[in-house]
Image: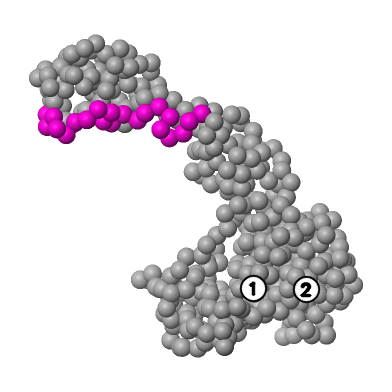
Amino acid sequence: MNLLPIVDRIDAWMCELRSLIRTTTTEPCEFEEALGRVLAEPIAAMFDSPSADVSAMDGYALRWSDVSSRNISVVGTVAAGRAPISLPSGSAVRIFTGAVIPAEAELVVQREYCLEHGDSIELQCPLESLRKGQNIRKRGENARAGDSVLSAGQLIRPQTMAGIASFAHTNQLTVYRRVRVCIINTGDELISLGESCEPWQIRDSNGPMLEAMLSPFMWVHVSRMRVRDTLESIEQAIRNALVDHDAILITGGVSMGDLDFVPQAIERVGGKIIFHRIPIRPGKPMLGAATDEGKLLLGLPGNPLSVATTFRRYGLSLLQSIAGIAEQEVAPIEKVQCEDEKKLDLLWFRLVKRRSDGVLVVASSQGSGDVASLAKCDGFVEIPPGQSASGEHRFYRFG
């Protein structure tokens, strides 16, 4: 049996769902508050970079015709941030990194290759090691005025802030509005941390986990609620959340049981279901839908391991699309060790722990409700259909 179409089908469903959800609108943002946001408009260089020919080294700026001279007079010094000076024939200018070189200079010789005599220097390097343009960064070699430096859809990271600070025309940027996400946890059995827990009840771990998985991202705003296992309460919760949220993550109530009302509730609020029950483990009951307004409705199974893996593998990338992030993550391929040779005819997400030598080792687990094992792991690897876990596979970190 050819198992590869399983992965292709899942990718096709995700692409279809992604085509139906809409990117958020844009808004102005001050530069000082832009870290972690998503650029909505490209940024072009407002001037050449560098804006003049500058020295790439501390040393001496010379004319090419003077490199064979035994003693060369030093007629001045120029540092970064100062206006350039002229360079008479037969002389040198002491220059520091980033300083504008004299118009007449044709190379810069590093200071360590010069014997300094106060007001003159002797070159201590072979002449054949020198060339015109040496240690000079030419005007505009990094970027020309008007060149695109940053693109729309870029996540603003610390290094992006350096580019913005260097090239942006104003202090105000245009960014995509934060994605408003509502987490709805369903289940009559759920209670909060700190409450007395009866044997027939369980602590709500899915809500805190999803909120924590989203907390590092400045491009998202999260709210959370818990509802009872009734069609009416779930439907009303979704309707309320749709008023001012871009995406709704629902945990539980998505399978085939008598109390699994999420699919019906989504249809009642006008959601178009693109997929429901896909060939993955854990997380087979996952449901993906969108409204006519382009809002995401993602139904995740109730078991914590299923929630963690399906959200990390699929939900996060969908939210990134809504946020306007252009470059989707490609999970790294890493070496994996596993004690068993089990194989499945579906896509299998297996928990892993990173060993002290850096190798990922498949962890033992008692099933998708095993929060104890989940809490000890670093992430999971994606095992293609028909393959064992030992080998090289894509690794997804939880955080």
Q: Position of residue 109 (x, y in %)?
A: 22, 28
Disc number for residue 390: none
Label 1: which secondary element: helix
**In the image, what residue occupies the spot 83% across and 60% down?**
292
**In the image, what residue occupies the spot 54% across and 31% down?**
146
Q: Amino acid at mark 1?
A: Ile
* Disc on the earlier residue, 1 or 2: 1
Query: Residue 164's quadrant in the figure?
Result: top right
Q: Is residue 79 left or right of residue 303?
A: left
Q: Quadrant of the C terminus?
A: bottom right
Is 129 a magenta residue?
yes
Give the crowd class for mark 2: few <14, some 14-19, many >=20 residues within 10 Å. many
**Majority secondary structure of magenta residues:** loop
Q: Amino acid at mark 2?
A: Thr
Residue behind mark 2: 186
Q: Mark 1, mark 2: which one is toward the viewer?
A: 1
**In the image, what residue occupies the spot 60% across and 68% down?**
313
Magenta highlight range: 124-145
Label 2: which secondary element: strand
Q: Quadrant of the N terminus?
A: bottom right
- Is residue 279 shown above or below 289? below
Disc number for residue 10: 1
